[in-house]
Image: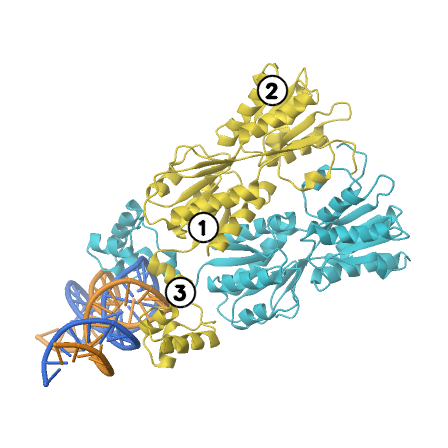
Chain colours: A cyan, B yellow, C blue, D orange
Amino acid sequence: MFKPITIKDIAQALNLSASTVSRALSDSYEINPETKKRVLAYAEQNNYKRNPIALSLKQRKSYSIGVVVCEVANSFFSQAIDGIESIAYKNGYNIIITQTHDSYDREVMNIKHLANRSVDGILISLSAETTNFDHIKKLHDAGLPIVFFDRIYDGLATHKVSSDNRNGAKMATQHLIEKGYRKIAHLANAPHLSITKERLAGYREALTENGIPIEEANITYCHHGGSNQKEVDAAVQYFLSMDEKPDSIFVASDRLSIGCLTAIKKYGDKAYMPAIAGFSNSDVLDLFSTDFSSIRQPAFEMGRVATDRLIQLIESKYPVYEHESIVLGTELIERIPGKLL
Amino acid sequence: MFKPITIKDIAQALNLSASTVSRALSDSYEINPETKKRVLAYAEQNNYKRNPIALSLKQRKSYSIGVVVCEVANSFFSQAIDGIESIAYKNGYNIIITQTHDSYDREVMNIKHLANRSVDGILISLSAETTNFDHIKKLHDAGLPIVFFDRIYDGLATHKVSSDNRNGAKMATQHLIEKGYRKIAHLANAPHLSITKERLAGYREALTENGIPIEEANITYCHHGGSNQKEVDAAVQYFLSMDEKPDSIFVASDRLSIGCLTAIKKYGDKAYMPAIAGFSNSDVLDLFSTDFSSIRQPAFEMGRVATDRLIQLIESKYPVYEHESIVLGTELIERIPGKLL
DNA sequence: AGCGCAAACGATACCGGTATCGTTTGCACC
DNA sequence: GGTGCAAACGATACCGGTATCGTTTGCGCT
């Protein structure tokens, strides 16, 4: 069923050899212009398409890029994928997207799967559970180009693209402080993630600079990145159970922001409603004027930059020894309660 | 750089022929169990992985599925992709995602690209602009399995998976009526889309059943599916400019809902604020208690079902002549203003 | 002894391209 | 008229597997 025309078909039809046709199609200088025209014309008419799989086999290149994220149904990642796609397609690559759902096992599975499918390179944003990096190291050592974005692993000599998490966190916390809040809790992501550490640092910095003591009891980690809501529920319930309840919460991620709001909606009451600020790339949030200011990462741009660097690695003729750590700026989006909607 | 071990390497190492190794690896009955063990052991140790590209070339099968949606950064589609992925991976397929951004040209490009990349089948949700289906028909006639989901084209004999758009639209409109609204406008998608027609039908049905006259002036189409905000802005401004302004709006899609809210936020005022109900799969919306009830489609399930059917088509040994049109239920999510958040 | 037959493995072709090397042809030139 | 050389094309091998057919070997049976 469905057998497309090959180079040999053209050769036979025009009484040429496969070699000649191949060369004509790739515009080789040692083919008679006359012959070229005939071949091109015939190919056009019978709408010949070179078989990318045969090509892949021959050139040991698949023109596809693997993407590993925790989930696409997450504004940050879907926007990043948008950016990844835009660069990939421009360069003739297609992207194969896999989701870890923040599970280490699935990350290992997916990455192995991608390597088997012989992608030319991989873009990775680590799962929240990942603390062992052997599965990635192995591939990297074997020569597979890898670029990290968002959730970085520093132990690998390669390009890394992230946003200015420290400063973003600082802005968010500072923002809460400026609004008069003093007991600011922090709902953090899994502790080993790069973004967790950086955002925590920004949080601490803002507090310190404002002379507010840092209390470890105010910081709660979500070891699975909030992929199961129970985890977030527990964290919020913990905050609500404190003797001296926090008056505000700085939330560390997109996923957690939604989880946190959900939990507060479930367990909070009118009498007590903490202010919230946190990382989020949701467009929908922009529509509402709840008391929730957010830090937006340049997701699309991060995807673009990461993909650009990955393709550079892939297409480099020589091993690359110099690696960039690119950090893009974050943006504070203030939301004033009381306005329309 | 990075050359994995092949079947021939194993053959040489064990003093066997490539054929024998191949058969041993695929557990052929005509290979000595002893030999099998040796091969398997060696393969395991040197972690041999069969080259899927060579396999694809030989079997004329790529074990990959093309997905065409308007954009992943859209709750409905990202959830659908979640569903698609879950079934695809379970069956050993990977998915290649492309975005049309509701442009006809990009749809044609992407589909051609996928066909060239020799995917085994394609899942399509049409772009808002598409009125000509030749690019799809051609591939379908050539034998490429295709399944439509969400935005269906009826002119092709294949499986189609959608949600009960008519009833969903009816529920939303009915909901507005029950809340006391009478002049209900309809912000519709591109007129030729299947979902547009069905949702319009549901809207009309609800009005008629409640004895409310249908006025065409109250219906505005967005020919690009709201992919550029200007279009939506214009539609909303039109509603606002009417002599007798609508007291509520039924919005036809996820994208349009966000666009519509954005526009209202821009151009509306406190004095006049229409109620809104519409299709949306945004989780974030659930958090807020604005006066916006929504119709949720079973996106994940739609993705699952569509992929399941597509794989059936792909793996069927004989041409399939009977095709299903699967319609899944929709759900009304009521939001009562005034509650928390 | 001679035959049949099955078990276990090898050799080869093929999938659809491209790279490498070889061949034919015509023509200029000494 | 033989040599050299370039233009234009053909033949072949290879990428990494698998399907098909062929070959060897041993053993049972008459």
The answer for which chain carries disc 2 is B
Amino acid type, mark 3: Gln
> How far apart are the alpha carbons under marks 3 and 1?
23 Å
Callouts 2 and 3 on one subunit: no
- Foreground: A17 or B278? B278
At label 1, the amino acid type is: Ile
Which percent across, then down, holds residue A56?
40, 61
- In the foreground, A164 or B14: B14
Tell me the quarter of the picture where residue B186 sits. Answer: top right
Instruction: Specify few, some or many for label 3: CA neighbours under 10 Å numbering under 14, 14-19, or 20 or more.
Output: few
- Up the image or down, A259 lies above or below A336; here it is below
Quick check: marks 2 and 1 in contact, CB under 8 Å?
Answer: no
Q: Nearer the viewer, mark 2 or mark 1?
A: 1
* Position in image of residue B168 (x %, y %): 58, 30
The mark found on residue B65 in the picture is 1
State the image quarter where residue A26 is shown: bottom left
